[in-house]
Image: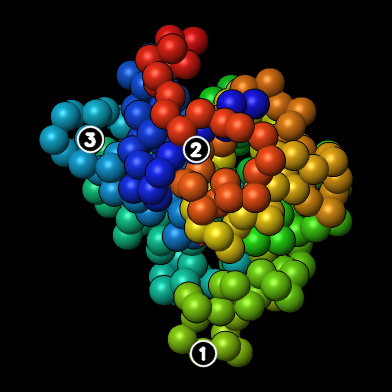
Amino acid sequence: MLVIVKETSRQMSAEAAEIVANRLRKKPNLVIGFATGSTPLGLYKLLVRMHKEDGLDFSKVTTFNLDEYVGLPPSHEASYGRYMRQHLFRHLNIPEQSIHLPDGMADDVDAHCEWYEEEIRKAGGIDLQILGIGANGHIAFNEPGSSLGSRTRIKTLAGTTLRDNARFFKRRQDLPKYAITMGVGTIMDAKEILLLATGRGKAEALRAAVEGPITAQCPASIVQLHRKVFIVLDKDAASKLAGSYPDSWHSSLLLER
Ligand code: GLP
């Protein structure tokens, strides 16, 4: 587990973009797991810029998103499908058929979740999974108490998550109660994980995830068992970590591997 602490969230995004671009240049048919939320927005902006200005090519990439709200069509302003199109997909050259998002409108949710897992398998597994973290330690929508071996399935959203995410909904009553999410086990199968966090609101979750015991009460803590995880933070998100971590990192050393 490599923890990299940057001074600002802007620098965190730049470091993350370097890691993603490096992996993509090394493997043009990279299978990328994408996250939503505010945290990766800076990274996505930089990837769009690298595509437009430096020709970073996404034409052979396959993507899988972590999660989606149940009951929201991709046209809904708060759906993750809409988020991905708006912030990333419409700016990049990823073929439509290579993009996978859980379908929040699926009639048979269980069958859909099995199909999603199968698609990931057929793609050869996820090479690089981008992750944010909830203030309660969730990853994707695996809330505290989620099985650490879980696969893609429907989950009930925690009260704290509903409160945190209410800002994306114009009317509170539209806030979904359920989501389809990759499981903790699905995420852990990714060959590499890039976990990002910024701000003091995430500091406690980060402390529990990085330095606390591995427990389903903080699903993010499972990444301690992953063989290749990069945790890139800004100073505020790292403010409750007791260990000392590099505030600058020679990406080249890391990215050679
Ligand atoms: C959301 C998403 C997660 C995301 C997290 C943090 O509920 N399901 O994938 O990582 O919460 O979001 P933010 O980056 O906006 O703090």
Query: Please, what is the three-letter code of the amino acid marked with disc 2?
Result: Val
Q: Which residue is mark 2?
A: 5
Q: Which mark is residue 50?
A: 3
- Name the disc covering residue 171, or none: 1
The residue closer to the viewer here, 84 or 114, is 84
Disc 1, ligand 1: is the CB inside 8 Å?
no
Instruction: Quadrant for the N terminus, please.
Output: top right
Residue shown at the point (38%, 48%) measured from the top left: 8
Is residue 24 toward the left or the right of residue 147 in the image? left
| Residue 54, visible in the rendered structure | yes
Query: Does residue 141 show up?
Result: no
Identity, as a three-letter code, of the amino acid under mark 3: Met
- Closer to viewer: mark 3 or mark 1: 3
Q: What residue lies at 35% left-to-right and 42% top-to-bottom? A: 11
- Viewer-side residue, 156 vs 202: 202
CA gap, disc 3 to disc 1? 36 Å
> Which is nearer the N-term, disc 1 or disc 2?
2
Q: What SS does tag 1 mark?
A: loop
Would you say 46 lies left or right of 39 here?
left
Q: Earlier in the sequence, mark 3 or mark 1?
A: 3
Spot occupied by residue 61 in the image (x, y as percentages of width and height): 39, 30
84 to 194, vertically: above or below: below
| Residue at image point 70% right, 47% down | 207
Q: Position of residue 105 (x, y in %)?
A: 59, 67
In the structure shown, which secondary structural element does the residue marked by tag 2 occupy?
Answer: strand
| Identity, as a three-letter code, of the amino acid under mark 1 | Arg
Q: Nearer the viewer, residue 105 or 170?
A: 170
Which residue is at the far left? 53
Density class for disc 1 (Cα within 10 Å; few <14, some 14-19, many ≥20) is few
Tell me, for residue 99, which label it has, or none.
Answer: none
